[in-house]
Image (spheres, rainbow, N blue to C red):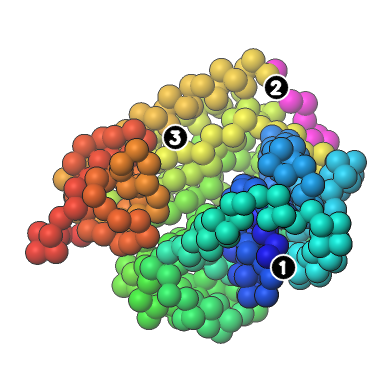
Amino acid sequence: MISVSVVTLGCKVNQAESTAIIAALNEKTGYHASEGLSTADVYVLNTCSVTAEADRKSRQYLSKMRKLNDKCRIIVIGCSSQNNAEHFAKNNVTAIGGSENKVDFVIDNIKEISESILHDRILFNDYSEKNSENCEKFSKNTQKTRKFVKIQDGCNRFCTYCIIPYLRGRSKSVPINDIVAECERTDSDEIVLTGIDMSDYGKDIGSTLSELLSKLSHIQARKRISSLECEVIDEDMLSIMREGNYCPHFHLSLQSGDDGVLKSMNRHYDTNYFYSKVELIRQFFPNAGITTDIIVGFPTETDEKFENSCKFIEKCAFSDIHVFPYSARTGTLASKKYKTLPKTVVEERVNKLLEIKHALHKAFIESNLGKAYTVYTEDAHDGLTEGYTQNYIKVYCSGAPCGKMIDMRLTKPYKDGAYAQIIDVADNNHN
């Protein structure tokens, strides 16, 4: 039995594609495929290139894999290998693909790789007595309650800082009937709809994201939407979500809270428009988790513009923020047009924004204490089960099983989230 470890970096689209690869491999006789870094015969590295740091982390995993098995075979796919295959070729990997047709690429290459492993008699279980234990672990790791469903790929926006449209190509939507069929087949308790630019869904096939959400409303599983652009938010969409068992968690990519910086980023909104969408969400979902991405130190960001950004971020009262220092990506308009800011300036701003992030996150947690939610339990550490509420608060609970949807009440702040207690159904009052 050949063991395959699939390691995923970056966005939820990559996670969805990795899940499809694992499922395709496990359907084939002779393979045990799992998610995450474990000792294996073959590694599939699904890379990210959204920042220079993401590229670096992608390459670092090669040495981690070889430390676990110095005779392993490695297949590299994704945006980083699409962006610069040579970085991986010089590291003596077995096969290098890009960001398209990932499942087919892995399946096409795995047979030849497997024959090479068997011929050279370096199968992992030839020198490990624990292979059966590992295979059992691999099987369990693939049995997840959450299902990632990719509804769209590519991007037409061409923000001046972003390399992804050049790597993923133009926006392409999956037909509604195909998405509905995939969601109807799953027995998962939670479905996560994901895409590179989900807000663009349907424009190439005569549909809209709201139409898709409406067609999925009958699915019993609770449904979560990944990153959105603010312009797609309207009353029709929010009404569909409220009635269709969609989680009140909205990840709206802001990137900067200053109008001048937004314009130089080629973001197609200003702060007033963005804030109107935040207010609209809270009219429909008062306890919504609204998270965002912020790029700190974009070349046109002066001290004054950074202060504007901080004030606007506090005004929006995000429940959490992903903070990224600006990373110049070769080939983008920003890298050609602007000179990067001094590293010390960017670091100072990152640290200040991280303080704001932690304060806003703490305030959001405290505002939800005493409320009841259904928590999807994912993992367990140090005697506590960990999971997430509908509005994406991380929860820690004693005595709860993993892989379940469990009613809990948030009782106090704990670590990066909240401690919760299991409650009786009769006592439940979901928010």
- The x and y percentages for residue 16 are 59, 62
> Main SS type for the magenta part?
loop
Q: Looking at the picture, which amino acid does disc 2 mark?
A: Leu
Return the disc, 2 or 3, that comes first in the chain's sequence.
3
Residue drawn 62% across the image and 70% down it:
26
In this picture, residue 98 sits left or right of residue 415: right
- The x and y percentages for residue 311 are 43, 29
Q: Secondary structure at mark 1?
A: helix
- 249 inside magenta stretch: no
Mark in front: 2 vs 1: 1
**Is 270 placed above or below 146 here?**
above
Considering depth in this image, is 174 or 120 the residue closer to the camera? 120
Residue at image mark 1 = 103
Residue drawn 26% across the image and 59% down it:
406
Residue at image mark 3 = 312
Q: In the rendered view of the protein, which quadrant contains the C terminus?
A: bottom left
